[in-house]
Image (tube, grey):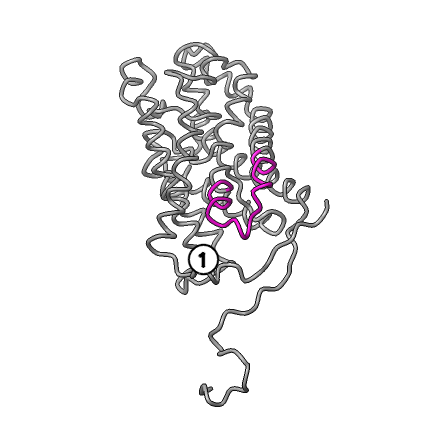
C-alpha cells in the first residue's frame, strides 16, 4: 500500500506493533521447569559420558556429543513453555544482563538453584543405575575411589582437564593444563554457545530457523563445541551441569578428587562459563544483532503470583 493511501494517523505497515501486556509464568512453575529441564539435560548428557566410559557403549566422541545435543534439544522442547528453558546458569546470567526487559533479575538466583538441583538429581539417578558397573570399572582399572587417579571414574560426574579418558591421570598430564587454562577454554566454549543461542532466538534474524527448530540447532551447537573442546576439558559449558554432579560425587566417595579436584580445578568450570556466556551474548549484540534496541520489547511482561 502506498503511503498516500493510508488513513491519517495510522502507522506504516513496517512499524513495530505496540507493546501488549502478557504475563511470565509464575516463579514456582518456572523453577519446576528449570529443574526438570536441567535434569533431562544432565541425565542424557552425563549418562552418555557414563555409558561411554564405564561400559564402552559409545564409539567415539561424536556419539557422546550427539546424545548431549539431542538431550538438550528435547529438554528445551519439553520445558520452554514453563521457564524459557535456560537450563544453564550461564544462559540465565547472559539473558538477565543482555535482555533485562524480558527476564527479571529477581529470577536469577531461583533459576540457578533449580538448575543445580536438577543436575544433582540426575547424577543421583544415574548412580543408582550404574553403581555396580562403576565399581567393576574401578576394580578392572585398579582405581581407589577418592584417591589420585580416580578421576578416571569420577569424570562421569564432574569434568577434569585434561580429559582423563584421553590423556590419562599422571601428574605430568595434569601439568598440561592449569586451572586458569581450563577456565579460559570453558569461557571460550560458552561464549561460542551463547553467541549461537542469541542468534537463533533473535526474532528479527530473518535467517534464523524459528522457534520450532531453534532448540534442535542449540543442541547441535552444543554437540559441535563438545566435539572440539571435550578432549581438552570435557567441555562442561554449564556451571550447574558440572557442580551438581560434582557435589553428588563428593558425597558418593570421590571426596577431594571430586571437590576441589586435582589442582583445585573445580572453580574453572564455574567461573569460565559465567565469564564466557555474557561475552558471547554481548559480541552477538554488538556485531550481528538484527533487532534494534528500541524494538526489542514487543511484549511487556508482568509477574504473576505463584
The span picked out in magenta is: 92-112
Q: Quadrant of the C terminus?
A: top right
Q: Is residue 71 magenta?
A: no
Residue 199 position (above or below residue 179): below
Nearer to me, 10 or 46: 10
Nearer to me, 178 or 70: 178
Q: In percent of the image, x 50 and y 69: which residue is there?
A: 16
Q: Is residue 262 left or right of residue 8?
A: left
Q: In percent of the image, x 60 and y 24: which residue is there?
A: 128
Q: Is residue 264 left or right of residue 122?
A: left
Q: Residue furthest right?
A: 306
What residue is shown with label 1?
202
Q: In percent of the image, x 46 and y 48: which residue is there?
A: 98
Residue 201 position (above or below residue 54): below
Residue 212 appears at what percent x and percent y?
A: 52, 58
Residue 154 appears at what percent x and percent y?
A: 46, 20
Amino acid at each position: 500500500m502506498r503511503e498516500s493511501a493510508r488513513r491519517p494517523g495510522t502507522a506504516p505497515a513496517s512499524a513495530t506493533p505496540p507493546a501488549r501486556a502478557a504475563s511470565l509464568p509464575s516463579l514456582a512453575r518456572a523453577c519446576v521447569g528449570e529443574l526438570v529441564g536441567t535434569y533431562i539435560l544432565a541425565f542424557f548428557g552425563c549418562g552418555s559420558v557414563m555409558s561411554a566410559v564405564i561400559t564402552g557403549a559409545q564409539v567415539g566422541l561424536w556419539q557422546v556429543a550427539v546424545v548431549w545435543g539431542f538431550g538438550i534439544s528435547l529438554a528445551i522442547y519439553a520445558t520452554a513453555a514453563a521457564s524459557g528453558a535456560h537450563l544453564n546458569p550461564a544462559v540465565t546470567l547472559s539473558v538477565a544482563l543482555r535482555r533485562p526487559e524480558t527476564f527479571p533479575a529477581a529470577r536469577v538466583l531461583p533459576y540457578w538453584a533449580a538448575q543445580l538441583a536438577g543436575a544433582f538429581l540426575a547424577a543421583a539417578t544415574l548412580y543408582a543405575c550404574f553403581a555396580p558397573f562403576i565399581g567393576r570399572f574401578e576394580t578392572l582399572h585398579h582405581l581407589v575411589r577418592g584417591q589420585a587417579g580416580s578421576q578416571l571414574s569420577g569424570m562421569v560426574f564432574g569434568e577434569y582437564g585434561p580429559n582423563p579418558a584421553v590423556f590419562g591421570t599422571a601428574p605430568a598430564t595434569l601439568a598440561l593444563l592449569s586451572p586458569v587454562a581450563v577456565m579460559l577454554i570453558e569461557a571460550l566454549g560458552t561464549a561460542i554457545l551463547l553467541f549461537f543461542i542469541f542468534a537463533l532466538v533473535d526474532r528479527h534474524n530473518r535467517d534464523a530457523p524459528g522457534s520450532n527448530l531453534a532448540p534442535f540447532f542449540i543442541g547441535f551447537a552444543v554437540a559441535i563445541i563438545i566435539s572440539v573442546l571435550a578432549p581438552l576439558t570435557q567441555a562442561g559449558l554449564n556451571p550447574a551441569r558440572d557442580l551438581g554432579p560434582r557435589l553428588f560425587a563428593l558425597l558418593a566417595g570421590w571426596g577431594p578428587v571430586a571437590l576441589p579436584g586435582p589442582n583445585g580445578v573445580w572453580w574453572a568450570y564455574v567461573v569460565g562459563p559465567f565469564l564466557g556466556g555474557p561475552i558471547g551474548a554481548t559480541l552477538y549484540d554488538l556485531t550481528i544483532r538484527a533487532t534494534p534496541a528500541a524494538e526489542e520489547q514487543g511484549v511487556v511482561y508482568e509477574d504473576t503470583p505463584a
